Amino acid sequence: MAQICRQTENIEVCLQVLLSRPQALFRYDLMAMAGNAIQLSRKESNDTVNFFNNLANSKDTNPAFKQALENCISNFKEGFMFLNLDGLEGRTATFDMHNAYDKAFACETDLSASKVAIDLVLARIKKWKNVFSVAMAAAGVLEDSLPIPE
């Protein structure tokens, strides 16, 4: 657990994510820990899409912000596809997952360019990043534990 959590953005969130499925810890099942962290990261991605969708469609949202918010919806939907361990055999899972982070970064760039500085938006992205960093770290530790393919 320490090997995973020391690589994350928030140790407290890391422990919450890893302890949310204690049976994986008792067996020190890296695959189960990584799978659970990715599953929670996918849930956070869906929650983030819903958050941006609600904000973009709210009558109270500044119309100047709508395009950036819609871009964030697209970015998080696209990033969702990269949150898996499909590339594990070829040792590309963490590379693939990093694409999800790139999509979140693109969202932040759009928000910044549109001068969207809403605390709830920043908090939502931070929450996603915290959970994502656990998934990324767990996938990295798992990937590093596998034999190098010939």
Image: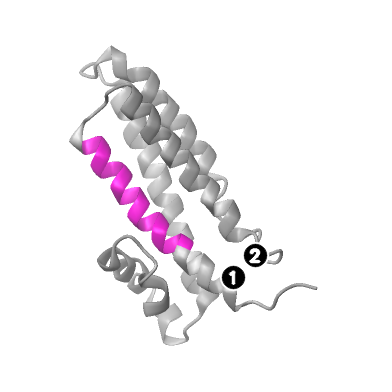
- Quarter occupied by the N terminus: bottom left
Percent position (x, y) of residue 109?
39, 32
Q: Quadrant of residue 5?
A: bottom left
Which residue is at 48% across, 39% downward?
103
Q: Is residue 111 above or below residue 16?
A: above
Mark closer to the chain start, 2 or 1: 2
Which residue is at 36% across, 40% downward?
48
Left or right, 88 with reference to 139: right
Percent position (x, y) of residue 95?
59, 55
Left or right, 29 with reference to 18: right
Residue 9 appears in the figure = yes
Percent position (x, y) of residue 29?
51, 80
What residue sits right under mark 2 in the picture? Answer: 88
Verify CB contact (< 8 Å) between mark 2 and mark 1: yes
Q: Is residue 71 above or below residue 98?
A: above
What residue sits right under mark 1 in the picture? Answer: 143
Circle 2: element type: loop
Q: Quadrant of residue 57?
A: top left
Where does the magenta region start and end? 120-136
Percent position (x, y) of residue 37?
44, 63
Disc 1 residue type (three-letter): Glu
Which residue is at 34% across, 19% downward?
66
**Main secondary-structure element of the magenta-colored stretch:** helix
Cα distance, mark 2 to mark 1? 6 Å
